[in-house]
């Protein structure tokens, strides 16, 4: 009984301190309705408790110990154009959209707002009318009832970043979403994105997570809905670096139409407690999805990568590769599910999770799952956990490479097959540099 | 249907050949469960006070629990625990000295099942044979070869007999691997278990024959709650077989057993199960709910426990034979074939808990689903902190026959030691058309080809079974999949 009372307490407190009731009365009628439904769903669910199978290895109660206020729009005076410039990926020409604590910041962004092919719209900007596609798609993919954090985000978001790529447009340069959390006080930020990639269009999106003025009790709970229309192609990179002390919950809900291509990378190098939900629905035939992930952890970092690939239509292919290096007292989770529905014949689905434990206090929990209802399919998964190969280490040492650098070299090699699939050269180089720096620590 | 298909031909007549019910006079307890029933069972068995106390403790704990319904990948209506008969026993079984005194109807029952107790007796001179403990409804009716085994110091008897004659062993080991607090059905079993088998292999003894328990649910409306306790002392070896059948009935019957295995230093226990409870009819009506807790502990160094199971029956199978690898250098193995057809559901797998150093475990699971069935592998490999150099390899394959069934894999891997090497692999596919074509080209018809391919697919597991069981298991596979081709 005490458990239920506690659950009510935390969630109720959250609803009060975040002023969710008040928030549900803001915005257009369309948004109000969506927020209200979400609030109802969150009130009913509460935060995930210990018995929740999806949060078995990542209890959340500790994150909500202190009282959280809603993250403020311009909470940090330090945030100027020059600080933002430093955070950009070196050598990468890109459209930059800066989101501070869940608010789209026009001032700190750097993109061409007049380009017809790429439309950026934020819901606070009432001067502009919401594009028709926004109302059609917003809130249609990430289901409140599937995860309490989706409901919480939908009830609490202040602003929606809507990126619309028109049909047949190949976006000239990558779009970078710089997701900044300023954490002077214990707060909860709720960034929200909707990305619509039109028919036969293609786009590369890089999402960077950065925190400034760290405070361990800050939480960033983001939700991105991505719609990839027929024949479209989207590359989506999530880089979680430079956000020490941040608690991060991200949900990416992608929906793929026929003949579309979706390629994601989730690279986690920093952060205190991170949960990445990546759900892909293949609702057209002949789709292809690639899910890659890499996490390198130390101290008492915790990272939980959840994936769900839902094969609803025949002739699709999905491929997952997640790798983790865990040191010190860190802990990691890989929970992947391949779901093949009755009609999804001729599905090819593959999933692999490989981990290396570098310390006796590190722990890894893996749960690679297959749930299959169609017979003419080829589905498999593999999961392995081990340590640095002594013989490989000996080989390198016998050639005069010091023990430490030999180890770093082997770990670097371990990360290579994930990093090599990053298709943007500047980003790949940037990731390599970050990883090298991280491993030589 | 192929005429030449001997294996299938044999059983085409009846869907479930063990579906008869025998007209044996039985004594039953009234329906329902309360403290009086627990006391009634205990009194019937003439149990000492400590046993009754332990039952009541378990019963009171059970009352505080909630029926687990949601985590497994199975669906069934809530069970009415007050609508079950918790005790049913064939009458007149006391003080049997020879087989002549056994109810002839009972003997016929076992003969129909293919286990002739009489024949067993006659063949007792022959070396390689099987000692059988036959359990019908709730009570162990006859244990064969007791005397031969006693010469070696091996104790093999019914659980109730052991309570009377070896209370010190029961007190020491019962509940040490599966305590009554373990789970809902373990608590229920600890409260109402009626009988089962007990086996103790003394130090350094290699059991000269296969030991076997044969379970049979007969009476309508009964639940079967048996308990098996197997203790292998230092340096001993035993191979243990378990088989089960039940009559065809329209209602669902509950089977909630507990099996505990304790392997001391250098001991080896091999436990094989061919589970063939009544699976219900084609529409999913009737059948046994098989909710079983099986666990072994490798207590001493260099000990080994190996589970082999062929699961073809039951409307719902829900069991996870597990091994706790406590001793250093201990070994745990799990080989499983689970077949589901029609409306059957299975959620089965294993748990390997590595605690000692240099422990090893192997998991091989083959799932086959046909018809409208759902077949899930659910397993846990846990490497505790300090369990250095642990090694695990898991291989879980699923075969789908038809597009209305489901095959699922839910492995849990928890690793807290950096020197562990853990590998898990799983695949899901259907029978290759090329292979079927190859067989057909050589004059083997589709159904037989499938039986052949399935047998090949399961070979890795079937090879682990003792000879007598392997043959039965192969036939069962063919029967279970009958009608699922084409």
Image (tube, helix red, strand yellow):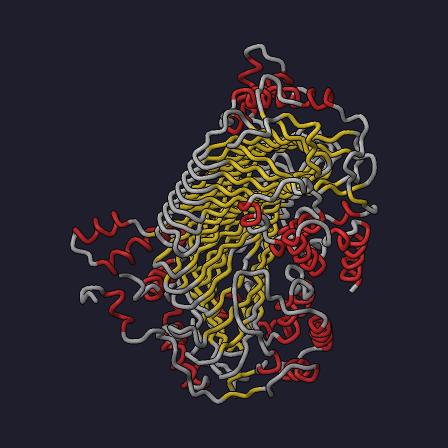
**Quadrant in the picture for residue A241:** top right
Q: Quadrant of the C terminus of chain B?
A: bottom left
Q: Is residue B141 above or below residue B271?
A: below
Picture coordinates of residue A372, whole percent (x, y): 44, 53
Q: In the shown orientation, is residue B486 left or right of residue A86?
A: left
Please give the count of numbered marks on the rendered protein. 0
Q: In the shown orientation, is residue B257 left or right of residue A28?
A: left
Res A38 seen here: yes
Picture coordinates of residue B485, whole percent (x, y): 29, 61
Res A297 seen here: no
Residue nearest the observer in this picture, B134 or A130: A130
Identify which residue is drawn at 61% across, 21% down.
A407
Picture coordinates of residue A343, whole percent (x, y): 39, 55
Identify which residue is drawn at 42% across, 68% down.
B343
Q: Is residue A346 above or below residue B181?
A: above
Residue nearest the observer in this picture, A262 or B267: A262
Picture coordinates of residue A113, whole percent (x, y): 60, 30
Q: In the shown orientation, is residue A57 left or right of residue A416?
A: right
Identify which residue is drawn at 51% across, 68% down.
B290
Q: Is residue B262 above or below residue A211?
A: below
Residue nearest the observer in this picture, B263 or A295: A295
Q: Quadrant of the N terminus of chain B?
A: bottom left
């Amino acid at each position: 009984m005490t458990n239920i009372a506690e659950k009510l307490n935390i969630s109720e407190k959250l609803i009060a301190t975040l002023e969710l009731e008040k928030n549900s009365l803001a915005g257009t009628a369309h948004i109000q309705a969506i927020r209200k439904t979400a609030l109802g769903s969150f009130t009913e669910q509460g935060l995930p408790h210990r018995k929740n199978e999806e949060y078995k290895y990542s209890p959340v109660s500790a994150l909500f110990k202190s009282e959280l206020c809603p993250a403020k729009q311009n909470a940090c005076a330090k945030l100027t154009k020059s600080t933002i410039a430093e955070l950009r990926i070196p050598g990468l020409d890109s459209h930059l959209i800066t989101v501070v604590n869940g608010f789209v910041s026009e001032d700190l962004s750097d993109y061409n707002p007049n380009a017809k092919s790429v439309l950026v719209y934020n819901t606070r900007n009432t001067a502009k009318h919401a594009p028709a596609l926004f109302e059609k798609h917003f809130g249609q993919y990430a289901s409140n009832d599937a995860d309490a954090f989706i409901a919480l985000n939908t009830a609490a978001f202040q602003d929606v970043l809507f990126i619309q790529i028109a049909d047949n447009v190949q976006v000239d340069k990558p779009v970078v979403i710089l997701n900044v959390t300023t954490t002077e006080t214990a707060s909860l930020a709720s960034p929200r994105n909707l990305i619509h990639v039109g028919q036969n269009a293609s786009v590369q999106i890089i999402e960077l997570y950065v925190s400034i003025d760290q405070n361990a009790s800050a939480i960033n709970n983001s939700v991105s809905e991505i719609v990839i229309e027929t024949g479209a192609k989207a590359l989506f990179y999530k880089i979680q670096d430079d956000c020490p002390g941040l608690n991060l919950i991200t949900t990416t809900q992608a929906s793929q139409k026929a003949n579309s291509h979706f390629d994601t990378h989730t690279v986690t190098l920093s952060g205190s407690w991170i949960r990445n939900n990546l759900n892909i629905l293949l609702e057209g035939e002949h789709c292809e999805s690639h899910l890659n992930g890499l996490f390198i952890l130390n101290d008492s970092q915790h990272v939980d990568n959840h994936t769900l690939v839902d094969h609803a239509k025949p002739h699709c292919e999905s491929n997952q590769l997640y790798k983790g290096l865990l040191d010190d007292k860190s802990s990691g989770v890989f929970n992947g599910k391949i779901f093949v529905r009755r009609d999804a014949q001729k599905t090819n689905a593959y999933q692999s999770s490989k981990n290396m434990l570098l310390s006796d206090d590190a722990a890894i929990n893996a749960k690679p799952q297959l749930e299959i209802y169609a017979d003419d399919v080829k589905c498999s998964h593999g999961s392995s956990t081990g340590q640095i190969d002594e013989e490989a280490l000996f080989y390198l040492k016998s050639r005069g490479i010091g023990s430490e650098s030999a180890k770093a070299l082997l770990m670097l090699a371990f990360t290579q097959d994930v990093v090599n699939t990053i298709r943007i050269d500047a980003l790949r180089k940037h990731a390599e540099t970050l990883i090298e720096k991280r491993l030589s620590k | 249907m192929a005429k030449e298909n001997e294996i299938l031909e044999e059983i085409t007549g009846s869907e479930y050949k063990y579906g008869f019910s025998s007209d044996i006079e039985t004594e039953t307890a009234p329906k329902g469960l309360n403290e009086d029933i627990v006391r009634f069972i205990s009194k019937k068995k003439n149990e000492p006070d400590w046993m009754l106390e332990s039952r009541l403790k378990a019963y009171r704990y059970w009352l505080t629990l909630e029926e687990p319904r949601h985590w497994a990948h199975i669906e069934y209506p809530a069970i009415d625990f007050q609508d079950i008969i918790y005790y049913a026993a064939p009458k007149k079984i006391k003080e049997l000295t020879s087989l002549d005194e056994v109810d002839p109807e009972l003997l016929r029952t076992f003969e129909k099942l293919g286990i002739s107790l009489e024949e067993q007796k006659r063949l007792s001179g022959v070396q390689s044979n099987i000692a059988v403990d036959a359990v019908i409804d709730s009570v162990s009716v006859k244990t064969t070869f007791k005397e031969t085994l006693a010469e070696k110091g091996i104790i093999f008897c019914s659980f109730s007999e052991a309570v009377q004659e070896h209370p010190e062993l029961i007190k020491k080991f019962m509940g040490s691997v599966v305590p009554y607090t373990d789970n809902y059905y373990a608590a229920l079993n600890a409260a109402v278990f009626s009988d089962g088998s007990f086996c103790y292999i003394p130090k350094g003894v290699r059991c000269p024959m296969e030991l076997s328990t044969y379970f049979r649910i007969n009476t309508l409306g009964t639940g079967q709650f048996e308990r098996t306790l197997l203790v292998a002392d230092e340096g001993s070896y035993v191979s243990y077989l378990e088989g089960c059948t039940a009559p065809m009935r329209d209602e669902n019957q509950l089977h909630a057993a507990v099996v505990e295995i304790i392997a001391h230093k250098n001991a080896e226990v091999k436990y094989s199960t061919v589970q063939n409870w009544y699976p219900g009819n084609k529409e999913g009506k009737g059948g046994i709910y098989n909710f079983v807790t099986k666990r072994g502990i490798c207590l001493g160094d260099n000990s080994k426990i190996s589970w082999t199971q062929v699961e073809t029956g039951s409307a719902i199978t829900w069991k996870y034979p597990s091994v706790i690898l406590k001793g250093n250098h201990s070994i745990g193995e799990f080989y499983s074939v689970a077949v589901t057809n029609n409306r059957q559901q299975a959620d089965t797998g294993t748990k390997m808990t590595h605690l000692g150093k240099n422990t090893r475990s192997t998991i091989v699971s083959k799932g086959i689903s046909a018809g409208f069935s759902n077949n899930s592998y659910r397993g846990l490999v846990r490497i505790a902190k300090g369990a250095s150099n642990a090694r695990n390899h898991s291989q879980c394959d699923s075969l789908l026959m038809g597009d209305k069934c489901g095959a699922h894999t839910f492995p849990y891997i928890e690793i807290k030691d950096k020197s562990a090497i853990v590998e898990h692999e799983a695949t899901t596919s259907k029978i290759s058309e090329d292979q079927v074509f190859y067989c057909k080209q050589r004059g083997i018809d589709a159904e037989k080809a499938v039986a052949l391919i399935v047998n090949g697919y399961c070979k890795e597991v079937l090879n682990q079974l003792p000879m007598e069981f392997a043959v039965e298991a192969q036939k069962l596979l063919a029967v279970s999949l009958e009608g699922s081709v084409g």
